[in-house]
Image (spheres, rainbow, N blue to C red):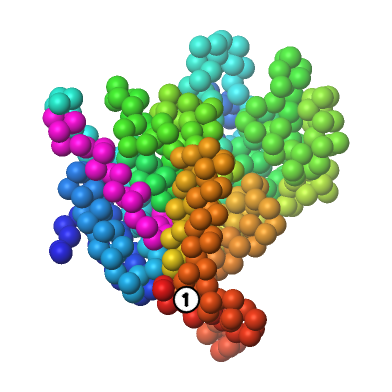
Amino acid sequence: MDFEFIRVQTEPPIAVVTLDRPKVLNALSPALVDEVTVALGQLDQDDSIRAVVLTGGPKVFAAGADIGDMAERGPIEQLRRDQTGRWAKVTGFTKPLIAAVNGYALGGGCEMALMCDLIIAGDSARFGQPEINLGIIAGAGGTQRWTRTAGKYIAMEVNLTGQPITAWRAYQLGMVNRVVPAEVTIDVAKQVARQIATRAPIAARLAKESVNQALETPLSEGLAVERKNFYFLFATEDQKEGMKAFLEKRPAEFKGR
Amino acid sequence: MSVLDVTLESGVQWIRLNRPESMNAVNGELRAALVAAVRDAERNPEVRVVVVTGTGKAFCSGADVREFASREGAVDAIRGEYERILTGLRNLPKPVIASLNGVAAGIGASIAMACDLRFATPDAALVEAFVKIGLTPDGGATWFLPRFIGTAKAFEIMYTGDPLPAAEAERLGLYNRVVPAESLEETVRDLAQALARGPAMALAAAKRSVNFSANSTFDEALDFEFMLQGVQMQGQDFKEGVTAFLERRKPEFKGE
């Protein structure tokens, strides 16, 4: 499929999905979000791809949803076209997804970054939920994921004041894995993706699933999920290869089987 | 005559506080002009280096006390402007030199400390006299001073309000160099013009790394500077620098 609002570069074993509406600071129109979910759906099916970087390019990640598109809409219309619900497909992506964030990640842009599994931030990055300035609130996870990652008080601050926080503060809050010079954010994210891509793909998938379960379940259930996934991996060829290679002191070659 | 005299000369933006009748005290007009000058210095690619200095006997005697006394209500606006000036100078991706032609007090001291380098005349004492009017220092002085001269000296000048003489400021490493008044401008001009011919990206990156280190651990700083160096290695200035070194000639940097 040809995309209008995003670019997809596959460099097996990784791929880079770039939001590409720079003139409107990558405003997240429903059409753009659909393209992201379609692209991720294709990459999820592509066995040559083991990790994906999601970025907005060198200047801006995404400065929110498309306000012009929303200004005159009513609630029923918003519900019917499922404006924020359609984003959920991003979280259904089963492979490691790394956000490379430069400049503003605001509103929906911030929520999209928070749906990723790791966040590499350029020193220019700013994260925020400014919806309250428009008389609404975050609608694609902004009140929930901030709370689960940075805690209630930070979540309240960003959602109630609408003021963004710096890359450095996000790093101190544990929301960001690394702060790097903005010129190399995407390169660093690709390096991390390539490193992850050398690991066993099924194990990566189940590690992601297990970590995400920690946010959904009581500890005992989460531990049960982890244990089952752990036992399950002993059914894979990659587990045999991984342990054999370790004992033979050579690098493992994982096949995703 | 404007309260701020801004001129561009051989890649060097001279920003000259110009209210000599009040020892360059910072009032609303001067604050607004400084905000604009710092912003313009950042945006104008022809500006490679910035020098901040003053006209007359003083560099800057601090906030204008007449305005200061009645500043209630305007505090937020003033704070916003101070922040844009001070953070602006610190984040400006170009070398910024304070040329201290005389005393630097209060916000004047903070402006001097927000610069990367400080050259001064023998009379250019640094003063934090807030205590004498029953206030604590502002403009980041409580952040700058312990880092630049250590807590003992920082407390001494903040508690007593006594001037820190230029010679001592030089000895403590707060000033780069004290030079005779008549040669200050020439000294600063020579250095500024040399820096303006330097590898601009590398200079900006050094400044970014130093700023980054204010928040980071050693390992994070090591990582950050290494990555910035990687970016520069793809630039023209690095190629020219290495080539010139091997050819035993002076490099001609283009800032790319």
Taking depth in this image into account, of A108 and B95 the one nearest to the observer is: A108
Q: Where is residue A152 in the image (x, y as percent from the top left)?
A: 52, 29
Q: Where is residue B249 in the image (x, y as percent from the top left)?
A: 57, 84
Bounds of the magenta segment: A77-104
Taking depth in this image into account, of A194 and A60 the one nearest to the observer is: A194
Is A109 on the left or on the right of A126, as rendered? left
Q: Quadrant of the N terminus of chain A?
A: bottom left
Q: In this view, does B132 lie above or below B209?
A: above
- Within-10-Å neighbours for mark 1: few <14, some 14–19, many 20+: some
Residue A90 showing in the rendered view: yes
Q: In this view, does A66 lie above or below A189?
A: above
Q: In which quarter of the image is the C terminus of chain A?
A: bottom left
Taking depth in this image into account, of A40 and B213 the one nearest to the observer is: A40
Is B60 on the left or on the right of A137, as rendered? right
**Picture residue at 52% right of the left edge, 85% below the top:** B243
Q: To which quarter of the image does residue A84 belong?
A: top left
Q: Where is residue B205 in the image (x, y as percent from the top left)?
A: 54, 60
**Picture residue at 34% right of the left edge, 31% below the top:** A138
In the picture of the structure, the residue carrying the numbered disc 1 is A237
Mark 1 falls within which chain?
Answer: A
Q: In this view, does B245 lie above or below B70?
A: below
Residue B182 showing in the rendered view: no
Give yes or no for residue A98 being in the magenta stretch: yes
**Picture residue at 46% right of the left edge, 58% below the top:** A206
Q: To which quarter of the image does residue B54 belong?
A: top right
**Picture residue at 29% right of the left edge, 69% below the top:** A46
Q: Which amino acid does label 1 sit on?
A: Glu
Is A31 on the left or on the right of B36, as rendered? left
Is B139 on the left or on the right of B123, as rendered? left
